[in-house]
């Protein structure tokens, strides 16, 4: 869910508007005197089920909670979102910062990082306060050479060490905040973010320090913390040690991705230099983008237990995770398999001994790491293995559970020969005799998925009791346009009126103005930008991903569905307007004039149905 949707979901439009308008119940809805024009009879309606409002009087405007605040407070979309987010207690912070072209500013932030890296590094090597950190590294067998090569550091247990060091060098408090070295409580003074921690400078591929990872040297609440997202640092696209690893990755045409800083250090120290760390989380799509430029052969070191846990995630949860979290983490298994197909990459997995990470393996016996690497298996085989381990092939329930886990993976394999190979493999694993049942399960799953896709209205209606804050057709249509730029010319019929949700109206308008994605992004503030990323991350069925023709047909169908919705909306509005006019004692001629204004007639609706029907026919 994007932050825009979350804010809208947590906002009750009746409550919100009641703060400005005295509302009275009118059937299932509410009405009152329009706050935007002066009137004696109420023509301002609020629809709790749709979470929308509409004025049937002189101003004739309408919209959702955000557009209400925009009009009421005379502010733009971003400011209105801010007002509502605060009211609803939703943080807008998680949105990515705007990409800004401030080369000078970036340069300065990098300089600050460079200066403080040297400072922390010096303290680790020489200060008395850094002794515990030195001991810790020695215990983990990290040599002084490695400490120097990676410029590890120590941040003292003080509130103002970085400040005291950097301010006299001419950097401002604002800059230290901006680069994330200090932090600030609301209205309070700023103070050092990193205190009594072992510091890992995180570099970009050119070796410039963009941010820090930091391990607590005491029983601090958080064992590991990072620099926050800044103009120069984005954790989700950073890979620890990439600067040191890049030449070796190119040379070997392969990269090993581990999770922790210590894992990367331990491996580099024994000469495995084509190694980077994803820093705690599973690999993200943006990290994959970084390695893609160096090699397509990726080896992941995974804890078999943790991997097993991942495999128990239900498909829907994985999907939800991949849509909700920004930036999209590649969900293990189906995500990785899909990624492998899309990038034409080869992803293998090193199965780590349960409960051990690479750092521990290496410290126990460096040669056993070599063995583990040699035993790395293709991601699909590894996934099959994890599921098979938990399986009792004599149990029918286990068999269908295994099918449920592994089918989404099979679906992601694009190459027909590999596909057939793994279908056979699954049939053998489950002792099914032949691959018939697996193929059957695949096709019925595809059927169900297709049905889910093509009938968003049905689920919409069944949830009518809940306020609708997001419209799947609008989202789908915009996601298509954003992800496939060549569809632009097919969108001529589409206008902003087709979108009822204010975030979609806003995005559609900007999209029309800007052909270029980077230009579009630079126009959006944080909330909308996050919603944009959410739409860009939306997944499509294989037919859409691969077929130009299927995409164009789908967009056409989408536009027709939106037209139909618009027609129905206008028709409903007209009916209410007529009622309002009658209640106000309007004359017959006024009423019939209003009736004729109906923009969308039954005839038009009929035409839409015919066009939609014929499209289905030709598909
Ligand atoms: Zn009005």
Image (cartoon, rainbow, N blue to C red):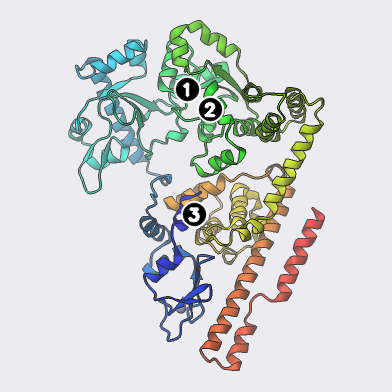
Q: Residues within 10 Å of mark 1 (few under 14, many from 20)?
A: many
Pointer 3 with pointer 1, Cβ within 8 A: no
| Residue at (71, 48) in percent of width and height | 450
Q: Residues within 10 Å of mark 2 (few under 14, many from 20)?
A: many
What residue is shown with label 2?
291
In the rendered image, which quarter is residue 134 located in?
A: top left
- Answer with mark 3 or mark 1, whichever residue precedes in sequence: 3
- Answer with mark 3 or mark 2, whichever residue precedes in sequence: 3
Q: Please state which of the two labelled residues, at mark 2 or mark 1, is closer to the viewer.
A: 1
Queried on whether the Cβ of the residue with tag 2 lies below 8 angstroms from ligand 1, the answer reads no
- Up the image or down, 325 lies above or below 608; here it is above
Q: Please state which of the two labelled residues, at mark 3 or mark 1, is closer to the viewer.
A: 3
What residue is shown with label 3?
5
Pointer 2 with pointer 1, Cβ within 8 A: yes
| Residue at (55, 40) in percent of width and height | 322
- Answer with mark 2 or mark 1, whichever residue precedes in sequence: 1
| Residue at (59, 30) in percent of width and height | 311
Coordinates of residue 459 in the picture (x, y in percent): 63, 56
Instruction: Please tell me whether mark 2 sits on a helix, a strand or a loop.
Output: helix
What residue is shown with label 1?
276
Coordinates of residue 300 in the picture (x, y in percent): 55, 22
* Gap in angstroms between the C-alphas marked 3 and 2: 32 Å
């Amino acid at each position: 869910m994007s932050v825009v949707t979350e804010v809208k979901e947590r906002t009750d439009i009746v409550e919100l508007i009641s703060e400005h308008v005295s509302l009275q119940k009118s059937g299932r809805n509410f009405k009152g005197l329009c706050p935007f024009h002066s009137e004696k009879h109420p023509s301002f309606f609020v629809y709790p089920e749709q979470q929308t409002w509409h004025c049937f009087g002189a101003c004739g405007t309408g919209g959702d909670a955000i557009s209400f605040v925009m009009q009421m407070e005379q502010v733009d979309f971003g400011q209105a979102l801010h007002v509502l987010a605060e009211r609803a207690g939703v943080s807008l912070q998680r949105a990515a910062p705007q990409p800004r072209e401030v080369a000078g500013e970036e340069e300065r932030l990098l300089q600050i990082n460079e200066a403080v890296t040297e400072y922390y590094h010096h303290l680790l090597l020489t200060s008395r306060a850094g002794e515990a950190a030195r001991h810790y590294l020695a215990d983990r067998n990290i040599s002084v050479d490695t400490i120097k090569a990676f410029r590890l550091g120590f941040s003292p247990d003080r509130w103002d060490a970085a400040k005291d060091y950097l301010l006299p060098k001419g950097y401002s408090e604002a800059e230290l905040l901006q680069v994330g070295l200090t932090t600030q409580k609301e209205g309070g003074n700023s103070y050092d973010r990193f205190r009594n921690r072992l510091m890992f400078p995180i570099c970009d591929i050119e070796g410039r320090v963009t941010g820090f990872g930091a391990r607590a040297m005491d029983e601090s609440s958080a064992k590991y913390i990072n620099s926050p997202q800044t103009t120069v640092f984005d954790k989700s696209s950073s890979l620890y040690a990439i600067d040191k690893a890049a030449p070796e990755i190119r040379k070997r045409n392969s990269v090993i991705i581990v999770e922790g800083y210590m894992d990367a250090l331990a491996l580099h120290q024994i000469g495995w230099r084509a190694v980077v760390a994803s820093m705690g989380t599973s690999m993200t799509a943006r990290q994959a983008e970084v390695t893609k430029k160096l090699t397509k052969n990726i080896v992941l070191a995974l804890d078999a237990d943790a991997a097993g846990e991942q495999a128990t995630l239900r498909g829907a949860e994985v999907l939800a995770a991949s849509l909700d979290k920004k930036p999209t983490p590649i969900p293990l298994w189906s995500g990785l398999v899909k990624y492998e197909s899309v990038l034409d990459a080869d992803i293998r997995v090193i199965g780590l001994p349960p409960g051990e990470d690479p750092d521990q393996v290496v410290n126990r016996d460096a040669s056993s790491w070599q063995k583990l690497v040699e035993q790395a298996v293709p991601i699909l085989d590894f996934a099959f293995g994890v599921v098979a381990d938990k399986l009792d092939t004599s149990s029918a329930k286990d068999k269908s559970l295994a099918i449920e886990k592994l089918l989404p993976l099979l679906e992601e394999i694009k190459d027909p020969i590999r596909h057939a190979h793994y279908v056979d493999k699954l049939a053998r694993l489950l002792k099914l005799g032949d691959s018939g049942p697996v193929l059957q399960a695949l096709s019925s799953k595809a059927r169900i998925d297709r049905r889910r896709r093509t009938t968003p209205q049905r689920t919409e209606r069944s949830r009518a009791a809940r306020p609708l804050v997001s419209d799947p057709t609008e989202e789908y249509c915009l996601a298509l346009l954003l992800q496939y730029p060549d569809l632009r010319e097919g969108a001529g019929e589409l206008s902003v009126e087709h979108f009822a949700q204010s975030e979609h109206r806003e995005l559609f308008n900007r999209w029309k103005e800007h052909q270029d994605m980077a230009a579009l992004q630079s126009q959006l503030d944080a909330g909308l930008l996050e919603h944009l990323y959410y739409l860009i991350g939306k997944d499509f069925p294989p037919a859409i991903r691969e077929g130009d023709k299927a995409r164009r047909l789908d967009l056409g169908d989408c536009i027709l569905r939106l037209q139909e919705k618009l027609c129905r909306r206008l028709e409903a509005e007209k009916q209410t307007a007529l009622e309002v006019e009658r209640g106000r004692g309007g004359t017959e001629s006024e009423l019939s004039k209003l009736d004729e204004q109906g923009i969308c007639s039954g005839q038009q609706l009929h035409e839409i149905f015919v066009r939609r029907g014929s499209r289905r026919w030709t598909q």
